[in-house]
């Protein structure tokens, strides 16, 4: 619930103020995910002598067109505030031609009890909104072993004349596929022992502290308009990418039985089989599909077309997933493990096909080997994110990070169910850094949960 006082020099007409309000509201919808009807703006036109604002402090050159925005709001994260500061001048420049130097923003945070919208009530208190998770602590690393034996489910190569994979629509099954897997005993290493020595650009995965402001992960609007922005910032930070597209997400719960969610907001089951989401062929093909389904650039204010996508595909790009617990308790059931890419030779990869009625998706299964070095981070909490590559066009480094859910030996009869979210992104690396702003697929914005080629 932002309430915004807008101060500007007198002489601006009603149409100009309407356009300024539209730009502000559009920005808040995009970066904070506020409700569409949540528009509370108060315009204040002032005489020049009433705006005693230094024109040059902090390295800017303010003109008579400067606008001051005082934003009163319930608490917002640092990331959300920074996103507003960055995005608002861009939209105002487009809508009314305002220079970035003439945009002054200050944010005042307050509590839920500080708002009454009428009838003598504190409506935000009445709404019984959930409180953020607080003070979650994981066990000290030294209280857990450095490694222990576990069973991991590896796929089995198909016999001659058979395809490895499955038909998505059982009615289409021609009997020419096998889909067999087997448990193999291997060693699971405690990633917390190595900590920051485990890096995305060395091992293929990395753990990062990255708190979220999200209250309801079942709300697609909240996830897509707020959480996606948090994840874009995280992937940029860890990977060094210039631009990041978030195109899908999935909720998972150890209490679910289906690998696919029935509808938006539902949770699918964890995937207890070693796999990588893409192959060397399917990742570029998946990127080119966005030329048809649509990728919206908030900076360019249009869908990126086939030529744009071809240009992005000509540069380095990487598919990067981000996995997080969304429960208030540490993860103790079916956590996610990743394999150090340096321990997996290419000869261990083999194809797995997902056969749809209109297309065939591909990902990689993996031959079992005692040489594979597996890691997980015991008892991950909500403030932590596991970031891992599932494809990188750059060949001299981690490209395909195999991963799987597994039965954790630390699980007890009283361990809570796992609840998690995984977000799928594409990171783009330019020769010259050009920030294209937030890129979002229309699939994501419409809440479409089409299974991508790489997921199973």
Image: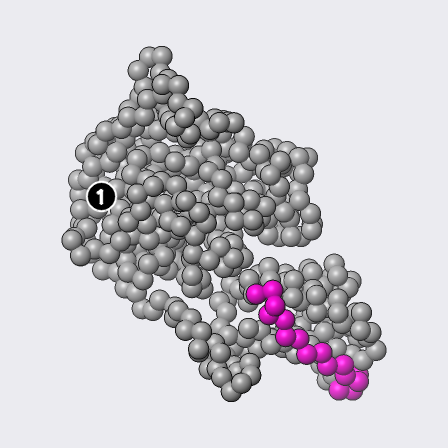
The answer to whether any part of residue 192 appears in the image is no
Q: Which residues are magenta?
A: 35-50
Left or right of 46 on screen, residue 391: left
The answer to whether any part of residue 416 appears in the image is yes
Quadrant into which the N terminus falls: bottom right
Residue 55 in percent (x, y) is at 73, 76
Residue 231 in percent (x, y) is at 48, 53
Residue at 27 percent of width and 28 percent of height: 181
To which residue does mark 1 refer?
407
Left or right of 353 on screen, residue 348: left
Could you say which is closer to the camera, residue 292 or residue 60?
Answer: 292
Residue at 36 percent of width and 18 percent of height: 175
Residue 253 in percent (x, y) is at 32, 49
Q: Residue furthest front?
A: 171
Q: Indicate how the structure is coloured in the image.
A: one colour
Left or right of 101 on screen, residue 431: left
Q: Secondary structure at mark 1?
A: loop
Q: Is residue 377 above or below residue 289?
A: below
Image quadrant assignment for residue 342? top left
Residue at 70 percent of width and 65 percent of height: 22
- The verdict on residue 47 being magenta is yes
Could you say which is closer to the camera, residue 428 or residue 170?
Answer: 170
Determine crowd level at label 1: few under 14, some 14-19, many 20+ residues with C-alpha closer than 10 A: some
Residue 432 in percent (x, y) is at 63, 44
């Amino acid at each position: 619930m932002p309430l915004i006082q807008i101060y500007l020099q007198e002489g601006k007409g009603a149409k100009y103020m309407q356009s300024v309000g539209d730009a502000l509201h559009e920005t808040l919808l995009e970066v904070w995910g506020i409700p569409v009807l949540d528009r509370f703006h108060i315009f204040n036109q002032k005489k020049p002598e009433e705006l005693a604002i230094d024109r040059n402090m902090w390295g800017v050159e303010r003109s008579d067109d400067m606008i001051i925005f005082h934003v009163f709001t319930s608490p917002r994260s640092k990331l959300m505030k920074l996103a507003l500061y960055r995005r608002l001048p861009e939209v105002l420049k487009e809508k009314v031609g305002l220079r970035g130097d003439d945009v002054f923003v200050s944010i005042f945070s307050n509590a839920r009890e500080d708002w009454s919208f009428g009838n003598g009530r504190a409506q935000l208190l009445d709404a019984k909104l959930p409180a953020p998770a607080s003070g979650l602590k994981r066990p000290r690393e030294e209280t857990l072993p450095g490694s222990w034996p576990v069973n991991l489910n590896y796929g089995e190569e198909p016999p001659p004349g058979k395809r490895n994979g499955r038909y998505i629509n059982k009615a289409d099954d021609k009997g020419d596929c096998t889909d067999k897997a087997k448990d193999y005993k291997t060693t699971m290493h405690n990633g917390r022992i190595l900590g920051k020595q485990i890096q995305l650009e060395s091992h293929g995965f990395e753990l990062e502290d990255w708190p979220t402001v999200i209250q309801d992960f079942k709300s697609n609007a909240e996830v897509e308009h707020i959480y996606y922005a948090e994840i874009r910032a995280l992937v940029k930070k860890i990977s060094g990418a210039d631009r990041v597209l978030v195109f899908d997400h999935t909720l998972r719960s150890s209490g679910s039985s289906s690998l696919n969610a029935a509808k938006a907001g539902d949770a699918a089951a964890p995937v207890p089989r070693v796999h990588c989401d893409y192959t060397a062929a399917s990742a570029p093909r998946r990127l080119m599909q966005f030329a048809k389904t649509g990728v919206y650039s908030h900076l360019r204010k249009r869908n990126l077309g086939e030529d744009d996508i071809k240009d992005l595909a000509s540069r380095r790009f990487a598919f990067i997933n981000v996995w997080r617990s969304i429960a208030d308790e540490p993860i103790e059931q079916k956590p996610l493990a990743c394999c150090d890419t340096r321990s997996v030779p290419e000869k261990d990869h083999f194809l797995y096909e997902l056969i749809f009625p209109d297309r065939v998706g591909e990902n990689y299964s993996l031959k079992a080997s005692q040489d594979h070095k597996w890691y997980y981070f015991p008892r991950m909490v909500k403030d932590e994110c596991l970031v891992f590559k599932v494809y990188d066009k750059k060949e001299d480094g981690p490209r395909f990070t195999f991963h799987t859910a597994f039965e954790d030996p630390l699980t007890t009869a009283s361990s809570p169910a796992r609840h998690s979210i995984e977000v799928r992104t594409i990171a783009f690396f330019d020769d010259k850094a050009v920030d294209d702003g937030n890129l979002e697929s229309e699939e994501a914005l419409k809440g479409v949960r089409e299974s991508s080629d790489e997921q199973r």
